[in-house]
Amino acid sequence: MLIDELRRASQGEAEPLERLNELLKGDAGADLAAVSQLSPAEAARLILLLKPRRARVLLRLLPDAPGLATLEELDPDIRKYLLDAEGEQRVARIAAKLPIADAADFLVDAPEHLVEAALAAHPQAEALRAAITHIDGTAGAVMRRRLVAVPQDWTVGQAIDEIRQRADVIDRLYAVYVTNGGRQLVGYLKVRDLVLHPTDATVGSIMRSDIVTVAADTDREEAARIAEREHLPVLPVVDANGALVGIITATELREIDREEVEEDMRLMAGLAADASAMDGPLRIVPRRLPWLSAGLIGSSIAALVVGSYEDALTEAAILASLIPIVMSLAGNAGIQSSTITVQALASNALWVGDIWGRVLRELGGALLNGAIVGLIIGTGIMILSGFLGIDRPFMLALTALLSLLVVTVQASVIGSLVPLALKRLRLDPAVATGVFITTSNDVVGVLIFFIIATTIYI
């Protein structure tokens, strides 16, 4: 199969993709030799278009280095699912031959048993273990170790030679970092600095010292905020002694933002933060059942509230038709206000000095929304009363108006304040927009509705 056909298949074209599937069913070694000419990105796209069994066959056909680069293009969860026992042994063997920086970049997201297999075969196992031992979610766990760093007493010519020697492992040169004798970071050079100064000038005499760094144990989300605040495309990472250990590039910064958004979306949907599309049934249950159970408990409490007003429903059964409206409005209003607050917290765009101003704005908006929705429902009740013979339609319409007004206000205010409270307690505010807000507002909303209904209508 020619390389052009493989590339067309990687773009999703049906005919070459179908032919590739047929080849992968049998002995495709000779026919698919051109696979090695695909770029890692093209091979990764192709793998995602194939069924897992055939994707594994294709991965085995890739040479060692392109195969590892292709795996790096894939999501870590897909990597784990794609690699069978034979594939893991091969990857561990390849990683064991890599320099420490390259091996650490790949293994940081790998399963524990794969890391241990690579460590067992790597000639510098202890150094490699130290390079990948960072707490998940920190700058050290996401940083890239492939960079160019030179001593401050080197000349510009020596620095340029170092760049040339490392050109095959550096994807993009953001800066040349300058260190002292103990590898402590003291400055950096832009590429233009190397071009504009004579080759015999010392690096220390022309370096820039306005460098911003983060510690390896800094939370990755905080590191991304620092880079955004300082308008930095790359952020150096240092250890406890100030020694340069890696960099977080624009690619990693975008990845951090993407993963944080995805994590917040999972929490908002009542999923575990590490839930994945590759989860099997035995992983789905522990990652989803707790939140479903919490929702069940909340719904049960709401049902108890409704049951406690059985006499009121018996006396005025029409009230039951308003319960879904009240619960839906309470849940939606709470989710809207809590989502806005969570997004403001996540993007560091919440004005702390304006907290109460924000609450008042939410209150004003909730009053208007509640009044409008209440008037719509109330008007509908008055219109329907001419056809259905509703008892005391004006009082029922007033009950609906006041209930929806009060429910919208309480849901919006709670939705605004709960994420702030969770943030204060050092918990993830995104939890607030999931089952917690929805069920609590359902319970409170139904209770408010029946209190108003029994006061005005019954």
Image: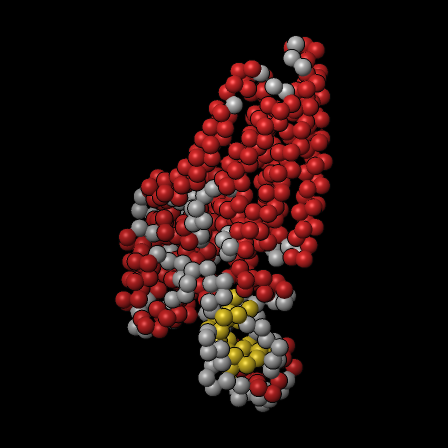
- Observer-nearest residue: 51 or 2? 51
Q: Going 70% across and 50% down the picture, which residue do you hit?
A: 357
Query: What's the colour scheme?
Result: secondary structure
Q: Residue 223 location in percent, x, y?
A: 54, 64
Q: Is residue 13 visible?
A: no
Q: Looking at the image, is 337 positioned above or below residue 242?
A: above
Quarter of the figure with residue 233: bottom right
- As drawn, 48 above or below 326: below
The location of residue 360, given as percent across then percent down, is 69, 46
Q: Nearer the viewer, residue 40 or 146?
A: 146
> In the image, what residue occupies the spot 53% across and 59% down?
221
Q: In the picture provided, is 370 more to the left or to the right than 154?
A: right
Q: Residue at x 47, y 32 (%)?
A: 301
Q: Quadrant of the C terminus?
A: top right
Horizontal side of 114 relative to 380 (left or right) equals left
Q: Position of residue 105 (x, y in %)?
A: 42, 64
Quarter of image, res 107 = bottom left
Residue lying at the far front in this picture: please name it: 455
Residue 232 seen in this snapshot: yes
Which residue lies at the image location 36% right of the left edge and 49% below the top edge? Answer: 82
- Direction from residue 299 to residue 98 in the image, left or right: left
- How many numbered discs sit on the rendered protein? 0
Q: Is residue 115 left or right of residue 402?
A: left
Return the residue nearer the eye: 56 or 296: 296
Q: Position of residue 249 (x, y in %)?
A: 54, 65
